[in-house]
Amino acid sequence: MSRQPGDSAYAGVTLRPGRCVAAVIRDATVLPLPRVSRAATRPAGAEEVLGAIAGAAYGYIQAVTIDLSRLLLEAVLHPAGAGQVAVIRIVPRAARDPRLARSPAKLVERLVGRRFTVAGGHDLLGNELCPLDTAGLARVCAHLQRAGVRGVAIVAPGSQAQPEHERAVADAVQAALPDAHISAATDFGGQGLVAREATVILDCALGAIAGRLLNVWEDAIRRSGSDAALRVARGDGGYITPSRARALPALTLGATDALELCGAAYLHGAQECRVVLPRPGGNVSGDVRNGLAVVRPAELAGIGTALVVPTAVLAPDPGVSQNGERRWVRDVPVVHADGDPDLLACVGAAVSQPTAWIDEVAFIESAEHLERIRREAEERVSAIVMANGAAPGTAYLTEASIVAVPYSPAGTVRIRVRVAGAAEGGLGRAASAHSPQAAEPVAP
Amino acid sequence: MNSTAAGPGYIGMVSSIGAEDVLTLYEGAKFYSPAVGDANKASLTSWLTGLLDRNGPVALRRADALPVDTPCISLCVLGSGAALADLPPAGDEFALAVQRIERLQQLTFGAIYPLAAATVSALAPVAAASQLGLPLLDADGMGRTFALIHHTAMHLAGVSPTPLVAYGATGESVLIDAQSASRGTRLLGATVDPLGGWAALAAYPTTAGVLRRAALPGTVSRLVNVGRLLLERTDPDLLVARLAAITGCHRVGRGRIVEFEQLSRPTDRTIPAHPSSLVIEESGERGRQFRIELRSEIVAVFADGLLVAGVPDVLCLLDVSRGEVATLDSLEVGDLVDVLVTPADGLWYSAEGLAMVGLASHGINLDHPRRR
């Protein structure tokens, strides 16, 4: 079969320790490719996979979306060297209890070599609680310099609303350690200092390996002569550009679960469904709405603490009752994903869309003010989705929730907005996923 | 289960709380107030587990098991759980708040009790009891959470909440000695935000003898028992049936959230959080529309315009897909939820109880369904 004008093919690749699985979707047909047992973390492995993709796509491929999340999780579970990250927690005063001074997740804490507290911080709405201790910060920077630290994670309360202290600390650290990888919590937003701290620790620890993997795949695509775009699957089942993944590798954590949900839904032609996924410990299930996995910022399986990057919500599946009736959820179709889970993840990656999400706290004084805050949030997340790879004008709202924050001053709201888009020159799945009834365009 | 059931709300009494009980306590506390999300769950439960591991279990005692003149002090988290998650405790705030009142009153407390045995306010008194080496009373002032600190059984029994201390994670504290409970609440309201949006509150210093008649008994034990059920993560239909057996709850209906509305009623700024609403389309043949009125907690449930439940009922949403209590700051359009109604302590349905915490206190001037 020769390629016709307008044909497009997309590839999804899931990287596992010691193996790699890929699939191509060409003209809405899924073409599974033979497993590559060679590690696709090295140039030869990546080239072999790309060769197989090119063959299945008859030489033309629009985009290759790679799922790094299992490899990155493996790097967290079995770090090459413990204690790579220095953490600077900016709070009015240091924790007095050892359990509160560190991450509740042992896996995360194992990545930490040094911890420092610098006085400072803001409240949820950005009001300063304590001036930044610049003298203390200078002492910390001198210590980091002497120790030759390569990665620094920075977190402060209220930095989602007022990043001033985090940025001042990041600037000082960068001046002292020009080559260090710095992860600041303000770049992720989200709720909860401990969850935000765990996210930046992981981000910092994964920076080097994510960079190496992306170099391998970018070089391999370049050498192959293909003009395919390289994309990186993110935790919510969407994708981001390689440059965003380099800058914020924690965004890619947990992608596989969401990709499996989306892959199963795609194969069954369902935009709204509940997907049952087989797991060694029993079936789990998750939801797909508007063709996207339902996600939350929650505890990532195996990590031991909540993160602020949204990932698929999976729960033990209840199965059917004795009379064969589906339990719990009966108002949407149920898809049983009984195929190869790696292949499902590849399909999910191939059909993924650029996505973005924000999770903020704001203060409203009137219905008009609320509307303005909502519109501004949508515009911000629309700009982020374009940075993540969406073409201008393609962004559309997939979820928006504004809820009052209990026991906060009247007018305090939590705003969560999720936006998806489509890539330049190729719609991927966006055209079918985006129905005007289901999703609302967002101003670019 | 070794139960000494004596009607809804009374189940097997627990004699101590150890490290192995922390997660069950957390889940049970969420059932009686789903206001606080789980962003700080791992950290708070790790802190408390560590304390109980190091110091041993905290003894849980009925007020009538202590000498009548035993000085007791209540503790809770004052303010927003979201603020607490963003500015976690240093760990000494609750014990320092207690000790400040001890210095003022020149006495040593012999027991701690929760001001509100629900949400994170159920965990903090256990932590402080462990740190101070004191027993915890199996009693509290609300049996759930209400918006203001004088909305307590102690207040209705004539116990003053003051002197009280609010101790912030900033290391700053405020001592309030007011002329009346409502003045104390008002003065305290101005204190929370500068302390970072939450504070450790020590209040209602009194004696075990007074608390025998002025506090709600058994309200800590039941958290552990309810938490055990919730952690089983079973079929929600079965879970609701089991919860009903020990709490008296019932399901009003099941449906998907279709809409949120903010500032949906006039705002009375003396109560935290503005009024908001959510709309749920019931699944199945009945297809009713539920309107849920919120104000830090769920305050009323309407089905096709008819009031079917309201404060002081304990109202919560069970996330059907995940089989767990849904916290109010994490709800999203599309979520499938069960609307659960649990009777509160009988005290709250009395004329004076309803006058203080009933529907009218939230601007809903309708008779409570249990009084029709």
Image: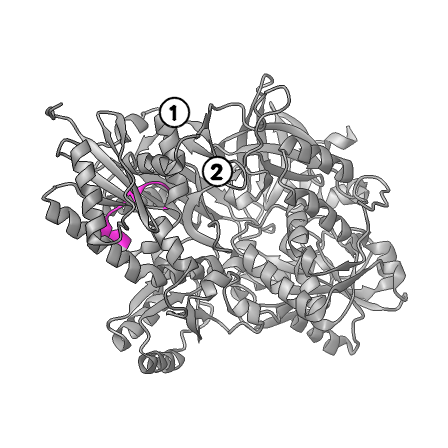
Q: Chain of mark 2?
A: B
Residue type at tag 1: Ala
Instruction: Give how far across and how far down residue A239 sits, in percent.
Output: 29, 43
Residue type at tag 2: Glu
Q: Chain of mark 1?
A: A
Please say if A185 is above or below B337: below
Magenta segment:
A235-245
Question: Within the image, what quadrant is residue A122 found in?
Answer: bottom left
Pointers 2 and 1 in contact (CB under 8 A)?
A: no
Instruction: Give how far across and how far down residue A169 sits, in percent.
Output: 34, 71
Mark whose residue sits in front, 2 or 1? 1
Q: Residue at x 74, y 47 (%)?
A: B225
- Label 1 sits on a secondary structure element that is loop
Q: Residues within 10 Å of mark 1 (few under 14, many from 20)?
A: many
- Label 2 sits on a secondary structure element that is loop
Query: In the rendered structure, does residue B143 fall within the stretch colored magenta?
Result: no
* A214 sits to left or right of A134: left
Q: Residues within 10 Å of mark 2 (few under 14, many from 20)?
A: many
Q: Residue at x 58, y 64 (%)?
A: B191
Q: Which mark is residue B332?
A: 2
* A155 sits to left or right of B49: left
Q: Residue furthest top?
A: B285
Q: Can the viewer see residue A354?
A: no
Q: Which mark is residue B222?
A: none
Q: Can the viewer see residue A313?
A: yes
Instruction: Give how far across and how far down residue A308 sits, in percent.
Output: 43, 52
* B131 sits to left or right of B62: left
Specify the quadrant that holds the N terminus of chain A: top left
Q: Residue at x 65, y 67 (%)?
A: B51
Disc 1 marks which residue? Answer: A270
